[in-house]
Amino acid sequence: MTIQAQVLEVMKKAQEVTGAAILMITHDHGVVAGVADKVTVMYAGKPVETGASEELFYEPQMPYTIGLLGAIPRLDGNTRKALTPVEGNPPSMVELPKGCPFEARCPISVDRCRVEEPPLLTIGGGSERASACHLSGEIGEEIAREGMFPTPDLPEWDAPGDRSARTEVLRVDNLIKHFPLTKGAVFKRTIGTVRAVDGLSFDVREGETFALVGESGCGKTTTLLEILELPTKQVGSVTVLGKETRTLRGKARKEIRRDIQVVFQDPMASLDARMPIGDVLAEPMRTHGWDKDRIQARVPELLKLVGLLPEHAERYPSEFSGGQRQRVGIARALALEPKLIVLDEPVSALDVSIQAGVINLLDELKAKLGLSYLFVAHDLSVIRHIADRVAVMYLGRIVESGDAEDVFERASHPYTQALLSAVPLPDPRKERERQRIILEGDLPSPADVPSGCRFRTRCPKFIGLSEGEAELCRTQDPASVVIAADHVAACHYAGALETV
């Protein structure tokens, strides 16, 4: 998000200097709201709605546009409400259906839509406002936009209100992972150390979603690998369901792997293209010694659990859409009935309309099965929607953590504030009135971590400090300051921090 904000700022300045036009192709509705004057929405290879940015966002006239806007998790939205997915998948471009290509997914389609494709026609006599829908003139008047696409009712898990009363599923204590930096092709010598993870501590409770966020290079992936690989030589400790993983050997080590599973970012790359889905789901069960009858009963059960059909077991990954493949990945992670699922950017590769369905599925499964999630993502809007607790990482350390609602509403570390200000809102008026915090420069190398506060080289607060205050940041690594119950920030001036 911070790099995106820098790039958008450069584009804006370049346009001001050169007077050039910009043609932007994107699925990020927040970016569109902030930079676009005119917008064209496409579906099945054709424009289905065009117009000024504010008109499309506030008064859309095409059901597909309405569905897309309703499916977006918003930083300023209701975080506990289910998202509104656009059910179904786009049609094949090889064999387009007769009539309106969106008809099969449209909640207000009529008989005419099935036989006649609507042309892109101007609305209200204007030359720039147009929609390809037979019912455009009725949307917003006879047909309400609100509630056009049904929002599912998700179950709620009846968990104890006090998180300390819930079982501790994962505990990470002072986890450190350093890599030697070497030089030389034949005779290698160590010339430095890459401090990828530099003293990480957190815990995850039963039925809880704990999110790790931060820029690329901050150490999120290395943290996940240290948890998933169960290394025997580890600085710090990882404890799963009360068992410290570095002490486990043989059978005990294999058994703990049943309780911690992973869903990867790219659903196509993580599924074997040569195996039917039934075999993909059966593989972890065979590995852990399940008998044939038990596996045969479990596979259709898993497919139904994630919203697929039992007969899909005979299909190959290439025969599924991206959202369906990710559902298969989730089903595979659930096969052994784990207690903790690690999700590494699980929706970043999905279209907005498909993403909403997968996020709803994760919420539903957590409530039904009492699962715990360790969720890693860049998209803070998704994190705001799905996380119960959140930790913000910078150069291998957690700089702020706590209850998600409290961290998002009262961010106390300048890095967290910068991350949140960089998240674009899918609302043209709000987005263009916001004050953006643009971080200067790139993330420092973990092989050359700055002295004192590791964020000071990019900190907008540091610039305004007195010499004495700045010296403290240059020489002392800040300890965590308690902001509120279950909310801490590692900043020398967190207690007095105002939004920069």
Image (cartoon, rainbow, N blue to C red):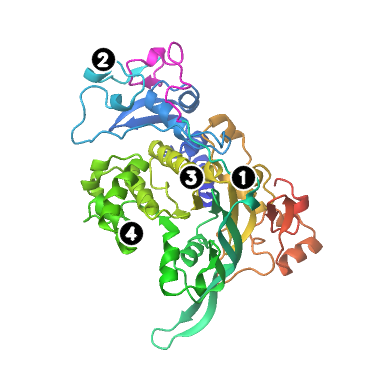
User: What is the C-alpha distance between the residues marked 1 and 4?
Assistant: 32 Å
| Residue under numbered circle 4 | 284
Pair 2/3: label in front: 3
Magenta span has 145?
Answer: yes
Q: What distance separates the C-alpha of mark 2 from that of mark 3?
A: 41 Å
Q: Are marks 2 and 1 in contact (CB under 8 Å)?
A: no
What secondary structure is marked by label 1?
loop
Tell me which amino acid carries mark 3: Lys
Give amino acid for label 2.
Answer: Arg
Residue 407 percent across, percent down from the top left = 65, 47
- Residue 332 in picture, x, y percent from top left: 35, 52
The kind of secondary structure element at disc 3 is: helix
Q: CA distance from mark 4 to mark 3?
A: 21 Å
Q: Secondary structure at mark 4?
A: helix
Q: Nearer the viewer, mark 4 or mark 2?
A: 4
Q: Which residues are magenta?
A: 124-152
Q: How many marks?
A: 4
Alpha-carbon span between mark 2 and mark 1:
52 Å
Mark number, residue 160:
1
Tell me which numbered mark, 4 or 3, is placed earlier along the sequence.
4
| Residue 26 visible in the snapshot | no
Circles 2 and 3: CB atoms closer than 8 Å: no
The tag on residue 112 is 2
Mark 4 or mark 2: whose residue is earlier in sequence: 2
